[in-house]
Image (cartoon, rainbow, N blue to C red):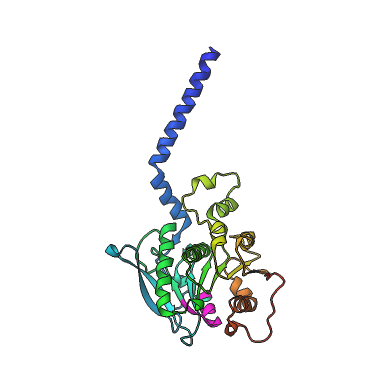
Amino acid sequence: MTLLRRPRGRIARLLVAGMALVALAAGCAHLEYNERQLTFLPSKDDARSFAGVPAGAQDVFVPVGDPAKTERMHAWWWPGRDAAAPAILYLHGAHWNLTGQTRRIEQLHRFGFAVLAIDYRGFGKSDGELPSEASVYEDAQAAWQWLGLRQPDPALRFIYGHSLGGAVAIDLAARLSDHGEPVGGLVAESTFTNLADIAAALTAEWLPTRLMLTQKFDSVDKIARVKMPVFIAHGTSDRMVPSRFSESLFRAAPAPKKLLLVDGAGHNNAMIVGEREYRDALAQLFALPQLAADGPSVLTAHARH
């Protein structure tokens, strides 16, 4: 009897496994949609802290996508003090929209940049519903083309991304490098190596996240292809995305590069807490002396070449 039960048991397990695979295949589209809902938290509403568009910034709409059914991204374009000002593309993270980004945008403008800050499709006043990894990459490329018409000097065009926006920025930088397009530099703040790593860090290391996730955001492989100066910043007290991920990205990035770990800063305030160090690092790495803070540069011991 025992000899007969074992084959039947194996057959039963195979049948169950086969049924599970069929169910998984049938539910893949639903699974991907749910994953995108967890990855992106787009909001159409203004942040509670929003006090209005920064004075001098302009509401603009950037076309993106299939020309036959063109959608538009809402953006703020904040020109610099003069036409020769360096221009930076601002790519925010997975939460909120432009109305929750004013502090960092204002700070970059105060540093001396002209700023183009976009809401991906699905966020804020932009067209579209739920974003995907592919759609935010497409949005960043369309915004980069738009910025090129406002600042024609590629040495004065820069890419900035915060949190998940850092992954979008790294993807854009890698694509531009692959095509030999010159760029002034890349700034990635409070970001991660890839989505599976951050998912494991926030859940359990033993879960098969790499097999389950369809949205990859594989920055650690892409950053090795980047052919431009790379500045990576992270708060040492970031509880959402540990700073070790930025250290891994820094090791993978080619030179010239700089890593700034800001003591005591969390996920959203590294630029604010480490303002002087941050600004001086940008000026030195990107050879933009006009960005340097007044007086001698005082880089912390955590700012490493």
Q: Is residue 241 magenta?
A: no
Q: Is residue 35 visible?
A: yes
**Residue at image point 62% right, 63% down:** 250
**Residue at image point 55% right, 57% down:** 221
Which of the pair 279/126 is nearer the observer? 279
Say how many tags the image has: 0
Which of the pair 234/296 is nearer the observer? 296
Q: Is residue 48 visible?
A: no
Give the position of the C terminus as an image quadrant.
bottom right
Q: Main secondary structure of the magenta part?
A: helix
Can you name the residue that lies furthest to the right here?
301
Can you name the residue that lies furthest to the top here?
1
Can you name the residue that lies furthest to the left here?
68
**Image quadrant where residue 272 sits:** bottom right
Q: Compared with residue 245, is residue 146 higher up or lower down, i.e. above or below?
A: below
In the image, is 234 to the left or to the right of 116?
right
Q: Compared with residue 26, is residue 242 higher up or lower down, i.e. above or below?
A: below
Q: Which residues are magenta?
A: 104-115
> Where residue 207 sits: x, y (%)?
56, 44
> Where residue 175 sits: x, y (%)?
47, 63
**Residue at image point 43% right, 71% down:** 144
Q: Is residue 114 magenta?
A: yes
In the image, is 230 to the left or to the right of 70?
right
> Where residue 38 sits: x, y (%)?
47, 54
> Where residue 247 sits: x, y (%)?
64, 62
**Image quadrant where residue 249 sits:** bottom right
